[in-house]
Amino acid sequence: MRFDLHTHSTASDGKLSPTELFSRVSELSLDLFALTDHDTLNGYLDLQAQGLLQQAPYFIPGVEFSALAEKLNVHIVALDFDPTNPALQSLLQQQAERRERRAKQIAERLLKLGLPDLYPAALARADSSESVGRPHFAAAMVDLGICKSIQQAFDKWLGNGKRGDVKLLWPSLAEVIDAVHAAGGVCVLAHPLRYQLTLSKVRSLIALFAAVGGDAIEVVGQQAKPEQLNHLVKVALQFGLAASGGSDFHDPKWAWAALGKVDPLPVNMLPVWALFQHTKLSN
Ligand code: AMP
Ligand code: MN
Ligand code: MN
Ligand code: MN
């Protein structure tokens, strides 16, 4: 089983257009693939409108939703939902509005801190005002010579807890999970090791995610050390969660997140695709 269930295109903060991504994916002979842009389905809808997805039944609907677990900004990868479901569409519309609102707030904060108005430059880097995010602000800072690199922009201004990080407007875990479930989809807690939490806090986060109806966690694709992976598997099994995995592909230049390069899931865990209602696989 070859799969990649976490990737990005220019519809959010990825470097390849959905069409470029589609053609690269077509060459990889994967069994299951999801484009999971941040808070938008536009890349998937673009490919569908081009009639490309009929030739690729392994290409399933996906979105990486921004959400709040108490005050922590976490990501939920939603997979295999009905894209036409009204609850899901309403959530996507709200996320688009939240992104636009947040981008204006980020720009205002940075302006107060003495930087130029970065809103137009960030917008120019994004697909639309509805998909603009911190990576587009980081790119604008590099363009304007305010920072030397994207990393420096996150470290100094935009990273979690920094002054340009506006996060309190995202919906709760339960709100996202309920809408995805209403659309017959499955919810995966993305990259549990990337929230800068201790292992005991990671466990609490997974417990909370399971308590509000979460279905699976990402266990592969995040360069975990063996003891970290063992911890994730143990906790996931304890809370009855399935396993998912993806490269989190953004940019062909990022060797550590190459498209389609995902290790097999742990053999003692239920694969997330066993929970799919719309896409049935034989193995
Ligand atoms: P946003 O969706 O606007 O909250 O931005 C989140 C995205 O920014 C993530 O999906 C990453 O692609 C990127 N990102 C987050 N933190 C960092 C960081 N420290 N360095 C570089 N990129 C980051
Ligand atoms: Mn991203
Ligand atoms: Mn993420
Ligand atoms: Mn991602």
Image (spheres, rainbow, N blue to C red):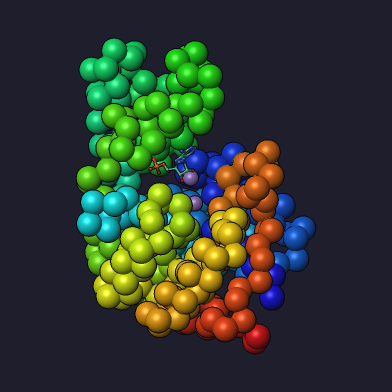
Q: Position of residue 246 (x, y in %)?
A: 58, 61
Which quarter of the figure has residue 67?
bottom left
Compared to 101, does 283 lie above or below? below
> 234 or 79, which is in the foreground?
234
Left or right, 174 with reference to 196: left
The C terminus appears in which quarter of the rendering? bottom right
Left or right, 140 with reference to 52: left
Which quarter of the figure has residue 122?
top left
- Count how many numbered circles sit on residues in the image: 0
Q: Residue at x 25, y 67 (%)?
A: 174
Q: Residue at x 50, y 41 (%)?
A: 13
> 13 or 52, which is in the foreground?
13
The N terminus appears in which quarter of the rendering? bottom right
Compared to 44, does 115 lie above or below? above
Q: Position of residue 236 (x, y in %)?
A: 44, 75
Q: Tell me, yes or no, if residue 179 can be seen here.
A: no
Q: Position of residue 252 (x, y in %)?
A: 68, 42
> 114 or 51, which is in the foreground?
114
> 222 or 109, which is in the foreground?
222
Q: Position of residue 156 (x, y in %)?
A: 40, 26
Residue that lies at the very extreme toward the bottom in this rendered image: 282
Q: Residue at x 54, y 24 (%)?
A: 149
Q: Residue at x 40, y 81 (%)?
A: 238
Q: Tell me, yes or no, if residue 116 can be seen here.
A: yes
